[in-house]
Image (cartoon, helix red, strand yellow):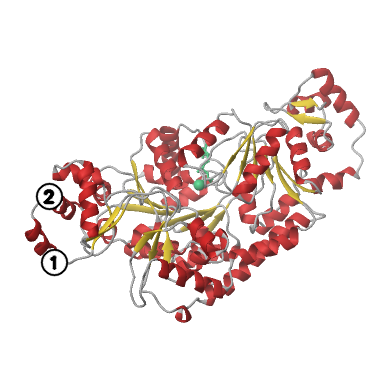
């Protein structure tokens, strides 16, 4: 064991320049090195990536990483490249050829990490190449997506099971920040863990004070919180419209703020995120689209303007506060009718069955698909336009499609850049006849056939420039020719776009024959209600400790009171502090020093630190003092 330990520490130092592991990392890495299937439950920011990256760098072979979002993939790959590690990602925007090359590099080259979306596993080319790779580990990031009892179930995640069967000897490491007991069991079941074990790190965040504020006016309360805390902050709101509104209000109040949601153009999003990350804007008002992949360590406050639908989501978002270990705040604002709103939210996530069926039928009709046809056909799909035309909400459309996806009827790709796609709608023989009849421009056809294997049977991403290069025509004339072939019904062609693609997974069935499995609807709805209830209970908790409540929810058995949440502080206010360490004395010291670190303050008293901490917390709570950017205590004016 000593040798292995030595080894992984060296790897950590050599590739990442870190001197030591964070709590929980070493234990998991050692298990992975022993080849045992493992489920690692570690809070956000704990450093989960390293626990599959270090073992991979410590030995021969490649690690396949399954992750749900393209954005996450790109982040990780960029990160590894910066450290001189060879990694590739396969995503939807790639042409068949570039996928081919990437996979070849995984078989014959020196690639150490292959990032894929779960949808990729089903493709033939992937399966064929994977068999030839020397795979040392399968890592499943955000593994809770596998469980339909989890808060972010993604049907495509069930495909991972196929990968497992393809590589039965390779150990699996599943990673997540949010899995209750039930979800953890489900993850291990679906992934067919052999000698599975759960490794759990604590969910305690000693430097984050969890606070719930009941108020009549959320805007007022929000600006009060933001004036009391110094430093970068995130305000989470539930909708796109709201992010703009709240941001406008904050700006009027003199805060440096901007907003962020998935509806903004990609470049704009990057720009805003960069500005905030560099500290040029202090407050980011955002929907839950903001956060994945951001790594800002000095966020002092995460304020939830609206409730989350689960404690999992709340903890993940709130957990972005205080990664640097300095005092930070996670504040939830609630008002009178929060409870009825919460119930409506769950109803919105699970539209009535009748509506789901209607959505299915209307989509098929709009795509002009006849009954008994259409399996495999993909089209651009604009959720907003559809919702508008059908007089239903965007959420209802999205959630209906999600449930339809889960039942194998259709899928909707992420909102991202899609490469152009092409498929022949004639057979090879028919195409041959056509070419003889026509003659001119056939170079384009030939190039398409050579470059994109499989275009006779399914939609393939193509690259117009690539075709131009191979055929010797200009990009413009290739486009013209493709249009012409399309008009002649030789090909089906989907131009590149930013809209998601909706694909029918099977032939259209009559509305009344649509089968929605209870597991995907009734049961999941029940567990969504349970999760909402846990969130509600957290918000309404009147005694105990917020942090302990969260820890227990995530299955920790020996959680202790944190001492710094609003409930712990309220409880303590009733108790008198020791005679030497009085609030007056602390205020006097802070005033004379101007600014003082908590550690120096404890030194001033030469006594047990907990007494000082208690008084400081109380004064922070009473807003008589505050913590500045550098973590020093100052008098609040
Ligand atoms: P998670 O996936 O658990 O949310 P990440 O893997 O994204 O967390 O890691 C969060 C940050 O912590 C990254 O910037 C990473 O480089 C850093 N980190 C991870 N492990 C260590 C370590 N042992 N020492 C120092 N920094 C670390
Ligand atoms: Mg992660």
Residue 225 falls in which quadrant of the image?
A: top right
Q: CA distance from mark 1 to mark 2?
A: 17 Å
- Residue 91 on image: x %, y %: 36, 50
- Residue 629 on image: x %, y %: 68, 27
Q: Is residue 202 left or right of residue 229?
A: left
Q: Is residue 556 left or right of residue 397?
A: right
Q: At x 41% / y 43%, what residue is drawn?
A: 74
Residue nearest the viewer, comparing 301 with 1: 301
Q: Secondary structure at mark 1?
A: helix
Instruction: Write down the residue under mark 1.
Output: 430
Residue nearest the viewer, comparing 577 with 440: 440
Label 1 or label 2, whichever comes before in sequence order = 1
- Residue 348 on image: x %, y %: 61, 64
Any part of residue 282 in sight: yes
Q: Is residue 242 left or right of residue 98?
A: right
Instruction: Write down the residue under mark 2.
Output: 443
Q: At x 54% / y 38%, what residue is drawn?
A: 295
Q: Is residue 10 left or right of residue 462?
A: right
- Residue 85 on image: x %, y %: 36, 37
């Amino acid at each position: 064991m000593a040798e292995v330990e030595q080894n992984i520490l060296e790897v950590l130092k050599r590739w990442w320049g870190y001197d030591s592991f964070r709590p929980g990392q070493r234990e998991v890495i050692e298990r992975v090195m022993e080849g045992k299937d493992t489920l690692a439950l570690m809070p956000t920011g704990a450093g989960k990536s390293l626990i599959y990256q270090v073992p991979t760098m410590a030995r021969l072979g490649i690690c396949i990483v399954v992750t749900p979002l393209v954005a996450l993939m790109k982040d990780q790959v960029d990160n590894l490249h910066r450290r001189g590690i060879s990694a590739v990602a396969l995503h939807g925007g790639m042409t068949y050829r570039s996928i081919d090359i990437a996979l070849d590099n995984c078989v014959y080259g020196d690639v150490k990490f292959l990032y894929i979306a779960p949808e990729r596993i089903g493709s033939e080319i992937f399966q064929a190449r994977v068999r030839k790779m020397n795979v040392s580990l399968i890592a499943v990031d955000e593994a809770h997506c596998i469980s339909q009892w989890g808060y972010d179930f993604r049907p495509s995640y069930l495909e991972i099971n196929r990968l497992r069967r393809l590589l039965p000897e390779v150990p699996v490491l599943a990673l997540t920040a949010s899995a209750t007991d039930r979800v953890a069991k489900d993850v291990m079941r679906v992934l067919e863990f052999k000698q599975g074990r759960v490794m759990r790190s604590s969910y305690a965040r000693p430097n984050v004070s969890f606070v719930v504020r009941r108020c009549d006016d959320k805007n007022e309360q929000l600006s009060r919180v933001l004036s009391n805390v110094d430093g970068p902050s995130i305000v989470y709101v539930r909708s796109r419209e709201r992010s703009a509104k709240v941001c406008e209000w904050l700006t009027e109040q003199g805060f440096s703020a901007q907003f962020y949601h998935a509806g903004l153009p990609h470049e704009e999003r990057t720009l805003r995120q960069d500005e905030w990350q560099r500290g040029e804007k202090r407050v980011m008002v955002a929907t839950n689209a903001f956060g994945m992949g951001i790594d800002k360590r000095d966020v002092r406050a995460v304020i939830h303007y609206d409730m989350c639908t689960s404690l999992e989501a709340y903890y993940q978002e709130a957990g972005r506060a205080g990664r640097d270990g300095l005092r930070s705040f996670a504040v939830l604002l609630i008002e009178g009718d929060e409870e009825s709103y919460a119930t409506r939210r769950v109803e919105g996530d699970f539209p009535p069955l009748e509506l789901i069926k209607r959505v299915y039928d209307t989509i098929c009709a709009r795509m002009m698909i006849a009954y008994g046809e259409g399996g495999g056909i993909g089209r651009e799909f604009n959720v907003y336009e559809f919702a508008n035309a059908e007089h239903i909400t965007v959420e209802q459309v999205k959630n209906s499609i999600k449930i339809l996806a889960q039942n194998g009827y259709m899928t909707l790709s992420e909102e991202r850049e899609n490469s152009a796609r092409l498929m022949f709608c004639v057979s090879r023989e028919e195409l041959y006849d056509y070419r003889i009849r026509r003659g001119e421009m056939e170079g384009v056809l030939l190039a398409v056939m050579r470059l994109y294997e499989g275009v006779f049977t399914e939609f393939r991403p193509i690259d117009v420039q690539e075709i131009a290069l191979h055929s010797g025509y200009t990009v413009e004339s290739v486009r013209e020719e493709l249009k012409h072939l399309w008009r002649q019904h030789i090909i089906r062609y989907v131009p590149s776009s930013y809209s998601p693609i909706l694909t029918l997974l099977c032939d259209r069935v009559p509305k009344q024959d649509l089968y929605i499995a209870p597991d995907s609807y009734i049961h999941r709805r029940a567990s969504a209600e349970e999760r909402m209830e846990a969130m509600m209970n957290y918000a309404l908790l009147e005694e105990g400790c917020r942090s302990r409540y969260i820890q227990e929810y995530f299955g920790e058995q020996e959680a202790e009171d944190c001492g710094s949440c609003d409930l712990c502080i309220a409880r303590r206010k009733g108790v008198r502090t020791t005679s030497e360490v009085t609030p007056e004395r602390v205020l006097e010291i802070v005033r004379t020093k101007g600014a003082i670190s908590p550690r120096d303050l404890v030194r001033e008293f030469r006594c047990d630190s907990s007494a000082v901490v208690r008084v400081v917390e109380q004064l922070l709570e009473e807003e008589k003092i505050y913590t500045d950017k550098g973590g020093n205590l100052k008098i609040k004016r």
